Image: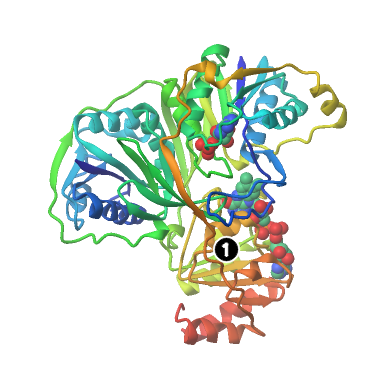
């Protein structure tokens, strides 16, 4: 079984971002970038499938500019077998919608024919939570979103999903699409020897324009602003004062 | 033209989040003057009639027969698509529940349109505001798609009035069963406390709680205040409490009148889920914890001293 994992280059989760003063977006210059944390979990899950002999090959794919190869190399250093970069035109500056990402991924899926595609549930920059579901829709595959456990049993994929009220279990026919939630696993760190080895692993580049998919977004950003900041309040000396403030001053208890 | 709102329910009750999403749909309607249609994946007459009574709703679409197949996105999405294609729908709207997050992008994919996730306000019928980067930026975005697929951050909207409407009812009998997947089961966490999404008061615990048993200290206070109990990711990951309690960027987004964070440091991802609360209280022994930067009232002390005292004094007031 071949597993394809989608990996997105995003701002590191620990970075406190700044909005550009001209309101055109978020300032990403000189900011630490990383694999989207949910995608690290996706890579880890694929590697575990391979290590338990349930998967034969782990291929990672990322859509972006040349610098997204850094994240692909990180995924290769974790243990993925090979990588595919879908190269956007150098002058492409608009953010892709999740639909466009899903269409570009579909082109890769058509070419690679993986039985399982694993994506993160959500990019921590756009906070969209859409791509996996859209990819499943346009490839007419079953989807197991927000997965906290997956098990393959005789050609059926059992997925435990984190839902608002608790947990849900579904069985998916393969081929399928899975999106990861936080509890699926704890991703490994790449060792130094593996980082060195990753430099020699195959990384193919596909030009996005060669795939015949319209890259122009149907959603445009009008403005990006900083939300109103909350002011730090006061430290109260004791519980009695706290209760007094919450009841008499705020009326919330 | 019509705005189609996918509503959800639990037992015989319409979800509060869906009523809040309906208010967002009404804001859109104010710019387009079209019909407001509510879709309920149910054949329960009492539920459908409750939806008909919601103020401002023009039409309710329900189903006949066994609707259990509709719990799966692989079936509900194409069923919604057939409804969209047979009517003239300009907007598909739903509260950003895990169910809608699962289903709406699949509908959007099938309809070949983009989706706008978790809007917090409506500028006009094609322009919306939504938080990005864990709520550290607010983007105003405009969609040029024929059909606009939108999920709504419920906490940003008041619930629509459940009374005063007299919508017509139409029953849909075609339920698509794609055969791609099947439902095995659910483990739903039962609690007599209010739901996180609609509670007026929430008390949440983090890694500082040390273990699941200690959450009883929070539950005592919650019961005294009639509050819901939440948690940080660290508390869920460590197995103290169940996943449905996680508040944050990738968990539940809440905005109660009062949020009490106990033994929670205040990471960006946690703040993303609660910083729109009206009043925030932080109880933490580290006076440098970032949670104090957003708290209206801070108690710098050991939570194991503060929680029993807090519960005692609150009980004495009652
Ligand atoms: C992709 C991604 C998504 C995430 N999504 C979420 C999310 O949705 N929600 C979320 O919460 N987090 C999320 N996180 C995790 C987040 O970054 C933090 O790791 C997490 O919120 C920390 O939880 P905590 O505050 O409970 O733990 P810690 O940061 O360890 O803080 C524990 C606090 O307890 C205090 N404390 C300890 N003992 C006591 C005591 N006896 N009395 C008083 N105070 C005490 C300490 O001083 C400390 O401040 C996410 C992270 C990533 C990368
Ligand atoms: N540019 C991209 N390249 C590769 N994968 C992506 C890209 N954008 C999104 N994804 C995948 O889709 C998931 C969900 O993204 P989103 O729908 O943007 O929240 C991510 O966790 C990735 O696995």
Is residue A106 in view? yes
Q: B172 and A197: which one is in front?
A: A197
Residue sticking out furthest to the right: A193
For the point 54% across and 87% down, the residue is: A244
**From this viewpoint, is residue B241 visible?**
no
Vertical side of A249 occupied by B32: above or below: above
**Vertical comparison of B6 with A193: above or below:** below
Left or right, A192 with respect to A243, comes to right
Q: Is residue B57 above or below residue B193?
A: above
Q: Residue at x 41, y 59 (%)?
A: B156
Please give left or right for residue A115 compared with residue B114 in the image: right
Q: Nearer the viewer, residue B113 or B318?
A: B113
Q: Position of residue A203 (x, y in %)?
A: 71, 19
Residue at x 69%, y 72% (from the top left corner) = B304
Q: Quadrant of residue A39?
A: top right
Total of numbered circles in the picture? 1
**Chain letter behind tag 1:** B
Residue B144 percent location from the top left of the image: 35, 38
Is B167 displayed left or right of B76 in the figure? left
Quarter in which the N terminus of chain A is drawn: top right
Splitting the image into four quadrants, where does ligand 1 fall? bottom right
Label 1 neighbour load within 10 Å: few <14, some 14-19, many 20+ = many
The residue indicated by pointer 1 is B204
Image x and y of residue B250, in percent: 55, 48
Query: Toward the viewer: B266 or B318?
Result: B266
Q: How is the image coloured?
A: rainbow
Determine whether the residue tagged by mark 1 lies in a helix, strand or loop.
strand
- Ligand 1 neighbours mark 1 (CB distance < 8 Å): no
Residue B59 lies left or right of residue A211; in this view the side is: left
């Amino acid at each position: 079984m071949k597993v394809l994992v989608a990996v997105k280059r995003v701002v590191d989760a620990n970075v406190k971002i700044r909005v550009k003063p001209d309101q055109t977006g978020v300032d990403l210059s000189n900011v630490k970038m990383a694999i989207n944390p949910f995608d690290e979990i996706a890579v880890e899950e694929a590697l575990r499938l391979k290590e338990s002999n349930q998967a034969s090959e782990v291929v990672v794919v990322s859509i972006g500019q040349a610098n997204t190869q850094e994240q692909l190399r990180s995924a290769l250093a974790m243990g993925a077998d090979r990588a595919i970069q879908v190269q956007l035109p150098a002058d492409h500056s608009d953010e892709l919608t999740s639909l466009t990402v899903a269409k570009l991924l579909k082109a890769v899926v058509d070419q690679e024919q993986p039985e399982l595609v694993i994506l993160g549930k959500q990019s921590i920059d756009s906070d969209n939570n859409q791509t996996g579901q859209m990819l499943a829709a346009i490839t007419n595959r079953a989807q197991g979103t927000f997965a906290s456990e997956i098990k393959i049993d005789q050609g059926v994929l059992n997925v435990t999903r984190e839902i608002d009220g608790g947990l849900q279990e579904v069985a998916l026919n393969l081929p399928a699409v899975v999106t990861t939630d936080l509890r699926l696993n704890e991703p490994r760190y790449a060792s130094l020897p593996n980082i060195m080895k990753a430099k020699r692993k195959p990384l193919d580049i596909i030009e996005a324009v060669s795939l015949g998919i319209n890259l122009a977004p149907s959603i445009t950003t009008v403005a990006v602003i900083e939300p109103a900041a909350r002011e730090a309040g006061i430290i109260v000396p004791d519980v009695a004062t706290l209760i007094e403030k919450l009841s008499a001053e705020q009326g919330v208890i | 033209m019509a705005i189609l709102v996918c509503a959800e329910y639990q037992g015989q009750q319409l979800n509060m989040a869906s009523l809040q999403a309906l208010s967002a749909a009404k804001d859109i309607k104010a710019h387009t003057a079209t019909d407001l249609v509510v879709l309920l994946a149910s054949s329960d007459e009492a539920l459908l009639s409750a939806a008909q009574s919601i103020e401002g709703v023009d039409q309710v679409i329900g189903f006949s027969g066994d609707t259990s197949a509709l719990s799966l996105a692989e079936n509900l999405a194409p069923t919604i698509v057939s409804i969209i294609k047979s009517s003239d729908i300009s907007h598909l709207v739903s509260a950003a529940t895990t169910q809608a997050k699962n289903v709406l992008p699949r509908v959007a994919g099938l309809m070949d349109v983009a989706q706008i996730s978790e809007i917090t306000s409506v500028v006009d019928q094609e322009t919306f505001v939504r938080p990005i980067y864990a709520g550290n930026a607010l983007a105003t975005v405009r969609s040029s798609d024929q059909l606009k697929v939108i999920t709504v951050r419920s906490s940003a909207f008041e619930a629509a009035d459940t009374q005063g409407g007299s919508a017509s009812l139409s029953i849909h009998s075609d339920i698509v069963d794609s055969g791609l997947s099947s439902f095995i089961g659910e483990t739903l966490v039962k609690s007599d406390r209010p739901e996180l999404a609609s509670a007026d008061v929430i008390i949440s615990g983090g890694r500082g709680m040390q273990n699941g048993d200690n959450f009883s200290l929070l539950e005592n206070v919650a019961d005294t205040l009639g509050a819901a109990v939440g948690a940080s990711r660290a508390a869920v990951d460590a197995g103290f409490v169940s996943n449905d309690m996680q508040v944050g960027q990738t968990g539940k987004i809440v905005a109660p009148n009062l949020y009490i964070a106990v033994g929670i440091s205040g990471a960006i991802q946690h703040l993303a889920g609660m910083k729109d609360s009206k009043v925030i209280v932080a109880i933490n022994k580290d006076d440098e914890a970032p949670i104090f930067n957003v708290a209206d009232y801070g108690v710098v002390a050991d939570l194991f001293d503060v929680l029993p005292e807090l519960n005692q004094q609150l009980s004495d007031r009652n």
